[in-house]
Amino acid sequence: MTTKIINLELLTQEKHQIRGLLDEIIQNPTMTNQYSFMEKATLYAQELPRRIREEFYNFKRNEDAAAILVSGNPVLTNGAGPTPSRYIELDEDYSLNDAKILHGIYGSLLGEGIGFTSQRDGSLYNNIIPLKEYRTTSNSSSGSILDFGFHVEDAFHPARAEYLGLVCMRNDERVATVISCIDDIALNAEEKQILFEPRFKISHNPIHDTSDIVEETSQAILFGHKNAPYVRVNAAALDLNEYEGIERQALEKLLNHFAENRIAVTLKATDCFFVDNYRCVHARDSFQANYGDGARWLARVVFASSLKKSREMRSSINTRAINA
């Protein structure tokens, strides 16, 4: 199986060390502000247990596993509270809980937390909750009735992040997050060359309210090294009928590869999950949402290896929100 996941279960001593770090952070009320916290998250990450730091570094450096799952996290000891019924990250007084803080610390071992101006006003943290008004909206993280097909997170954007991070507050519906890795895809030379050329439309999903500054119609799907390519694709919004001949043949092989190598991961409360967003696509099948206080609730942050690569697309050196 091409799609490999590192399962990292915290040891008792590691839990105690991490809980102590979280208690220290939360004593400073400014650290529950997402923007203030993210400026310090990389520093805090250096105080995590060495085994954790080593696992994350190996995941980032070796590019062997598709994702890393950290379970047994010492957070949400009194529960997550009721699931929000709206995007609370848009509130001026939005405050991070300990699960989101730990998620940000882990993610900072991989890169810098970023947002997009087209996505919830540039919020770094995005709550993933089912909303009734979006239940039939295709390719929406707040939808539920329709499948959310395979996609690279923010695939359309040249400054998309290398890593997608999710933390689970509640998942009583036991909805799986599905991932699939590009590794070992079987393409002939012509098919591979076609996918490396800027021939394809990579559209944004409804979560982005873009200003059309990014060219979406002529992009390459594969990039990086020819023998071990990276991928950017939004199969959730891909219309195969727009392509024919070798282009369609190559796309069909790509989609078949993802279907054959998919793995479903059912996150539990306190789980933190990080996906290689350059080598993997992810998806979510349709489900019957609970809605209300007990609805499925994840939070997402994406992490980029460097803020420098997006500098021309950010309005100031201080902001982490990339123009889109």
Image (cartoon, rainbow, N blue to C red):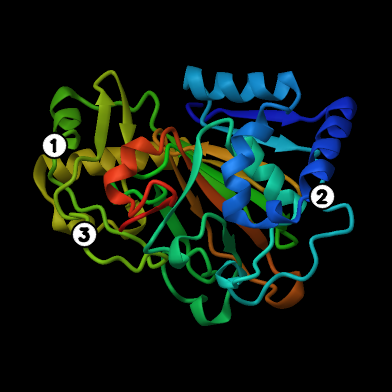
Measuring 71% from the left and 77% from the top, which residue is drawn there? 292
Left or right: where 153 falls relative to 55: left
- The quadrant in which residue 171 appears is bottom right
The residue closer to the viewer here, 275 or 57, is: 57
What amino acid is at disc 1? Glu
Choose mark 1 or mark 2, whichever is in front.
Answer: 2
Q: Secondary structure at mark 2?
A: loop
Say few, some or many: other residues with alpha carbon within 10 Å of mark 2 (under 14 / 14 to 19 / 20 or more). few
- The quadrant in which residue 236 appears is bottom left
Instruction: Please determine whether, in this image, residue 41 is positioned above or below residue 1.
Output: below
Pick whichever of labels 3 and 2 is earlier in the sequence.
2
Instruction: Decide if residue 285 is in sight here.
Output: yes
Name the residue carrying label 3. Answer: 213
Say few, some or many: other residues with alpha carbon within 10 Å of mark 3 (under 14 / 14 to 19 / 20 or more). few
Pick whichever of labels 1 and 2 is earlier in the sequence.
2
In space, the residues marked 1 and 2 are separated at their CA atoms by 51 Å
Name the residue carrying label 2. Answer: 27
Which mark is on residue 197? 1
Choose mark 3 or mark 1, whichever is in front.
Answer: 3
Left or right: where 120 falls relative to 36: left
